[in-house]
Amino acid sequence: MRRTLIQALTILVTCVVVWSADVARAQDEKGPGVVIIRGATVWTGAEQGTLEDGMIMLRKGKVSRVGSGGRAAPPMPGVEMIDASGMYITPGLIDAWTMLGLDPGGPVEAGATQNAADALDCFARDVFEDARRAGVTSLCIEPPAISGVVGTAVVVRLADLSDLRSTMTDSTSLVARLGLGVRGPISRLGEIKALHDAFEQGAAYRESWDEYREKLEEYEKKLKDGETVKLKKEDDKPEEKAEAKPDERPRRGPRGRRRGPRPRPSNFDSMSDSELLAWLQDTHVPGEDPLEGETHGDEDAPIAPEAEKPAKDAEKKDDGKKGGKKEGDELTKPERPAFDANLEVVVRALKRELPVRFEAHRPGDIAFALKIISEFHLDGTIVGATGAYLAKDRVVDAGVPIVFGQLTGAGGFDRSHTAEFDAEAPAALAAVGVESIVIGSGRKGGNSGAQYLAQNAAIAVGHGLSEDSALRAITIDAAKACGIDETLGSIEQGKLADIVIWSGHPLAPDSVVERVFVGGVEVYRRAGN
């Protein structure tokens, strides 16, 4: 018994020493101050699951340690110790689909080169502050145009609201929209065809550039080996020279003298044949006809093209035994395809370098979006998805993430989606095996939707979705849908320290946000706390 107590005491002292050493080392490193949070229930969103009596250490803007139980390090100068007993801690919430902060008067033109950042009102600090008070630390903002390939989305972390662009990512996904504001079947079919054509044109554009690069590589290789380059002649240019009309072509004499048309008499139309012949004879000027007085022999008779014989010099050039090269063997530099900035972005999507988010609501529109994803092998996501539960078999087979908007009602410009809205949709899709279900604020509410993100997740729980799936839908699964899961979305060692401390369970109706950290820096604290 005594030996057991000694061993336990030794382990405890070792843990305290190691923890204190980590804290001391963190103090010497540059970056945000060291923060130690202990005593809370920690929902990590990772393999560790939920930790009771958890401890988290934040340093240099990242999660340094996360665990449960044991004694905390003793108070040290420069280290903020937070006792969160009885509270809950989650990763910072991620709104994976929002229009928060978009300037109503900003760009709304459709095109792959359009970027959501171009329409973002960075001075709308109040709406971003509201989002942070609700525990939202990151936003995936889409461009506002409503039809076709509309541009690229960006992810913004709500760290320094006076300089949002400092924490804004590059384009994270290409956004395409289908069926918004289009009610007639003919118009919808036209929109579907236009969207399909956009990716088809991108595929043709990619193929033309791949072919050009292949030919250029072959050309440069042969050029390096000493091949002869065939220069383009003036006649080889694609522009065709305009030929003069026969009656407008100038005529010249034997010495190059220009000769205009013969003047016609006023009664030319009524002249008889004899009068016409007499006029022609009288107006003829000897010596102006270049063929006048010339004689021709048999050797001047025209030869048919197939009967022409090559010259002796040409025979020597074509004689492979003497080392001559045929004209066809001479190198011609391949012609460079025309550059198209919009199609360049589409090509990135076709190469799966850029995910594609299709906003579609009706089951038929979702089916067409899934067809495009399959046909062009895109890294696709369905956003909006009001009627996705009515096409759940297709969604399951496709295996794509589904991002819902607010569950308090259907959103979007086309209110006909409301007829197919059902708050049980997330639970219905989860029941049939859809692995990635995400909840965002969507379109409805404009600049007042992100702060209801936790409430939307709670509504999904009330309609059958599990609590764990609902929390994942606004944290780690949302991060995956935005392509930022390597650095955000869960509380794991090495990830960015975006942390929210809640007064109670995050999905409980009476829970409030106590404190918010972004990158290890406290950006919000509830009044009186």
Image (spheres, rainbow, N blue to C red):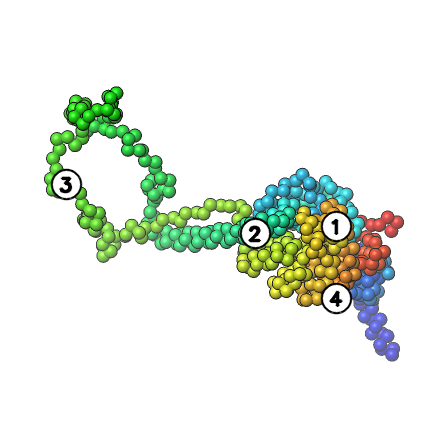
Whole-number angstrom distance, CA of label 4 to CA of label 2? 48 Å
Closer to the camera in the image, 183 or 7: 183
Whole-number angstrom distance, CA of label 1 to CA of label 2? 33 Å
Whole-percent x, y for residue 3 in the image:
85, 77
Closer to the camera in the image, 305 or 333: 305
Q: Is residue 454 in view? A: no
Whole-percent x, y for residue 522 in the image:
79, 50
392 with respect to 238 (left or right): right
37 with respect to 246 (left or right): right
Amino acid type, label 3: Asp
Amino acid type, label 4: Gln
In this rendering, the label closer to the viewer, 2 or 3: 2
Q: Secondary structure at mark 1?
A: helix
In this rendering, the label closer to the viewer, 1 or 4: 1
Residue in the image at 47% along x and 54% along y:
207
Give the answer, above or below, for where 276 lies relative to 299.
Answer: above
Q: Residues within 10 Å of mark 4 (few under 14, many from 20)?
A: few
Disc number at residue 48? 4
Q: Which residue position is annotated with label 1? A: 450
